[in-house]
Image (cartoon, rainbow, N blue to C red):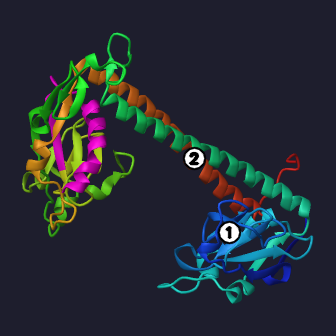
Amino acid sequence: MSEWVKVHLAKVTKIEYGDNLPSIHLKAQGYPVFGANGYIGYNDKYNTEIDSVLISCRGEYSGTINYVKAHTFITNNSIILRIKDNDLTTRFLYYLLHTLSHGSIVSGSAQPQVTIDDLNRVVIYYPKNTSEQTKIATVLSTVDEVIEKTEAAIEKYKAIKAGMMQDLFTRGIDVKTGKLRHSFQEAPALYKETELGWIPKEWEVCTIKEACLEFVNGGTPSTKNTANWVGTIPWITGADFLGTFEVGHIRRYINEEALRNSSSHLIRKGNILLVSRTGVGKLAIAPYDVAISQDITGIILDPSTYCVEFFYYYLQLLVEDFKKINQGTSINGIIRSDLEATLIAEPHIDEQKQIAAVLKALDETLMKEQSNLSKYYDLKIGLMADLLTGKVKVSEEIN
């Protein structure tokens, strides 16, 4: 393993602010312009001759570290770090700076900023052998490429799902072929006009109230009685829902007595949970029996007319409308009467199951990619902790 040295950042890099560029000088083409945390346009000149490391120095992005290619114009929202000699590679420096604590380079709280004086005080530790630096940067760059591809795949599948939902809930599936029906424009004879617009002739329209056997309210057992909170029954609030339409980690549990003596209710596994107060629009299918807080409405469907998973996906389309219902009012939540009166389409239950199956398959693909992404991030964190501190020597086989 080569010798590692410890020096002030200012000794091995030239540290200076980017240049002011009023937005009126941005152009539609030319050299790329990098702003506080991304490319914002083009200019007819550049201020970086070589690849450089940037640290955003003003506002919410203060302390964010970026890497830009040569011939880029850097605005004065970033500080540019240029390598002074051949003892340090730019790509290695980019990764190395990510190991610094945020507080070591960012000052201020109300108005966070990074200054040249802050960076002049920073001490870095790196291998003198640039070949080793290159190998380390190559390993981390490879992981970054995998992360970027996985993020792109996730965005692609999200877009596919959004498009499929729009088609499936307006055109549905021909149960005989298992394929989307022709659109209204392609085959108007397959459709009828309703309060919801043009829908397949086989579909009906009903209200959410008509589709449900019961709406179940929640509540909170007394927090003054600590005995209530010793038990095995999961108790959830809107804060326990994930952005992926799932219930996350259960934080609190109650017991049978707490459930009996409070306004909380138990929602059985497989029924729908809708956050109707704080955090309006969060949604999940109960993964197991759960007790609910007053933030949540349990929706118990009529199984003879609606498939739970179909209804769950249908509600995903409607949640944005639910959020808008009370915008601009003092009401914090969904009014039950508004929820009950909401009109929805009712395909035959066999078609509902096919629609739900298509969307569930897409969700499973998304979840797999998201799980992979989490693993890649963990891998990168581990590699950085090992390779950028000298704890582990990078493999000699890496070129």
Q: Earlier in the sequence, mark 2 or mark 1?
A: 1
Residue 285 visible in the displayed image: no
Question: Is 203 above or below relative to 91?
Answer: above
Question: Which of the numbered marks, if any, corresponds to residue 99?
Answer: 1
Measuring from the top left, give residue 219's x and y in whole percent.
13, 57
Of 75 and 223, nearer the camera is 75
Q: Distance between the residues labelled 2 and 1?
A: 23 Å
Q: What element carries label 1?
A: loop
Residue drawn at 62 percent across, 77 percent down: 22
Closest to the camera, between mark 2 and mark 1, is 2
Question: Is 132 above or below relative to 367?
Answer: below
Of 19 and 150, nearer the camera is 19
Residue 338 visible in the displayed image: yes
Residue drawn at 67 percent across, 74 percent down: 55
Q: Is mark 2 on a helix, strand or loop?
A: helix
Question: Is 98 above or below relative to 155?
Answer: below
384 on left or right of 255: right
Query: Magenta segment range?
Result: 297-325
Q: In which quarter of the image is residue 369?
A: top right
Amino acid type at image mark 1:
Thr
The residue to which callout 2 is attached is 151
